């Protein structure tokens, strides 16, 4: 396989699956965590390595190292591997997704931004999502008439925080997720609920439906529900680990234990909460986004700019959603007719948001 984003949490879990099933890793692509990358190189012995910055090449313990976006695309094109695991974060992941499609490779997609910004231009024939929620929905699908689909959210760092104090929260507090440890960007997106909005957009493209919603499930054990036309509902329950969706995305099916089963007696109870726009202002535009999926590129670009500003201490936490909502209001009639339009709109929105 080609693994894009090998040192992030998805990348590390993908290598756990590669180790378990003795899978070959031809290419490793990583950012700036060179120490972890070198450990991965030593164990998995890839033929090629691509990193973010030229100045770090001398630190990488490999004799075939290149850097930058062009090198990633070249590695995908020139590799013999049939599978690309795209665990890159942000808009940066779109071109590698498009290149993998162009090369006819199977894509195990954890880069949610690819579908959020350009779902209408992405051929899903060889695509499998790496996401607990979308995996759960896929797992539950039966040959029965479906009424609607629902995914769950953890609620993020501030799900129980006093509303009146949200304007003054620190970066450290925002990065303290109650259920797990993830990268900075996705942790902030979880706290604002933007991540769940992204996942609803992805689900709209993946399952060709607009009848989608989300609720908070605080223990992150239920990942998805399907409501059938007959009035019944099924739920996908599993311990929170990305290794299950990763295994299915890469292997196609999996008949041996990947996770320890959930002990419901030990869990004892589950708690569900409505996603309130008073706590998560971004939720105000859920229906608008789902009814006009072209807005996904605006949503993502504005959010990337806003999150970067927050992490650089330039704005407050609540300003993240304000910047995004303002951009959606400004560009709400946008329509993309080509993949080139996506890149143009992305640039325009970033400029508007002060990138």
Image (cartoon, grey):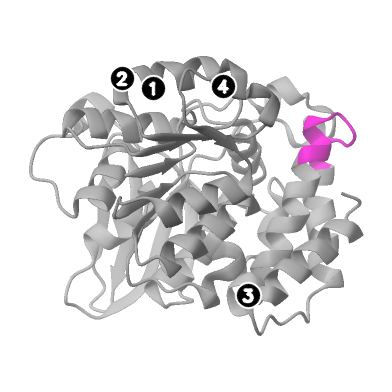
Quick check: 15 left or right of 123?
left
Q: Which residue is mark 1?
A: 40
Marks 2 and 1 close (CB-CB < 8 Å): yes
Label located before the other in sequence (3 or 4) = 4
Secondary structure beneath label 2: helix
In the rendered image, residue 301, in percent from the top left (x then y), is placed at 74, 57
288 drawn magenta: no
Q: Which residues are magenta?
A: 308-318
Q: Which residue is mark 2?
A: 43
**Residue 274 visible in the snapshot:** no
Badge 3 local density, few (<14 within 10 Å), some, or many (20+)? some
Q: Which residue is mark 3?
A: 339
Label located before the other in sequence (3 or 2) = 2
Say the numbered circle drawn on residue 216. none
| Residue 39 against residue 250 in the figure, above or below | above
What's the CA distance linking mark 3 and mark 1? 34 Å
| Mark closer to the observer (3, 2) | 2
Which quadrant of the structure image shows residue 170? top right
Residue beneath the point at 59% across and 41% down: 190
Marks 4 and 1 close (CB-CB < 8 Å): no
Label located before the other in sequence (4 or 2) = 4
């Amino acid at each position: 396989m080609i693994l894009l984003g090998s040192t992030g949490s998805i990348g590390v879990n993908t290598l756990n699956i590669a180790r378990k099933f003795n899978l070959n890793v031809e290419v490793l692509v990583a950012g700036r965590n060179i120490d972890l990358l070198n450990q991965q190189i030593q164990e998995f012995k890839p033929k090629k390595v691509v990193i973010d910055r030229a100045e770090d090449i001398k630190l990488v313990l490999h004799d075939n190292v290149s850097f930058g976006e062009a090198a990633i695309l070249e590695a995908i094109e020139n590799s013999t591997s049939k599978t690309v695991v795209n665990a890159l974060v942000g808009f940066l992941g779109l071109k590698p997704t498009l290149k993998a499609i162009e090369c006819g490779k199977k894509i195990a997609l954890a880069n949610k931004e690819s579908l959020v910004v350009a779902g209408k231009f992405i051929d899903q024939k060889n695509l499998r999502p790496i996401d607990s929620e979308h995996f759960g929905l896929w797992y539950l699908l039966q040959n029965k008439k479906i009424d609607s689909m629902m995914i769950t959210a953890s609620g993020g760092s501030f799900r129980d925080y006093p509303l009146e104090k949200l304007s003054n929260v620190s970066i450290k507090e925002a990065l303290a997720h109650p259920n797990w440890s993830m990268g900075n960007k996705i942790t902030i997106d979880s706290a604002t609920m933007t991540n769940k909005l992204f996942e609803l957009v992805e689900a709209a493209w993946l399952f060709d439906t607009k009848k989608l919603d989300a609720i908070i499930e605080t223990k992150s054990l239920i990942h998805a529900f399907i409501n059938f036309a007959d009035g019944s509902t099924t739920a996908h329950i599993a311990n929170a680990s990305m290794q299950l969706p990763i295994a299915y995305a890469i292997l196609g099916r999996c008949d041996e234990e990947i996770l320890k089963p959930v002990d419901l007696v030990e869990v004892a109870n589950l708690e569900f909460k409505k996603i309130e726009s008073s706590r998560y202002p971004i939720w105000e535009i859920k229906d608008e986004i789902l009814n006009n999926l072209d807005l996904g590129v605006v949503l993502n670009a504005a959010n990337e700019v806003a999150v970067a500003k927050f992490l650089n201490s330039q704005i407050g936490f609540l300003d993240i959603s304000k910047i995004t909502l303002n951009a959606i209001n400004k560009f709400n009639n946008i329509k993309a007719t080509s993949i080139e339009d996506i890149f143009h709109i992305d640039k325009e929105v970033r400029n508007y948001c002060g990138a």
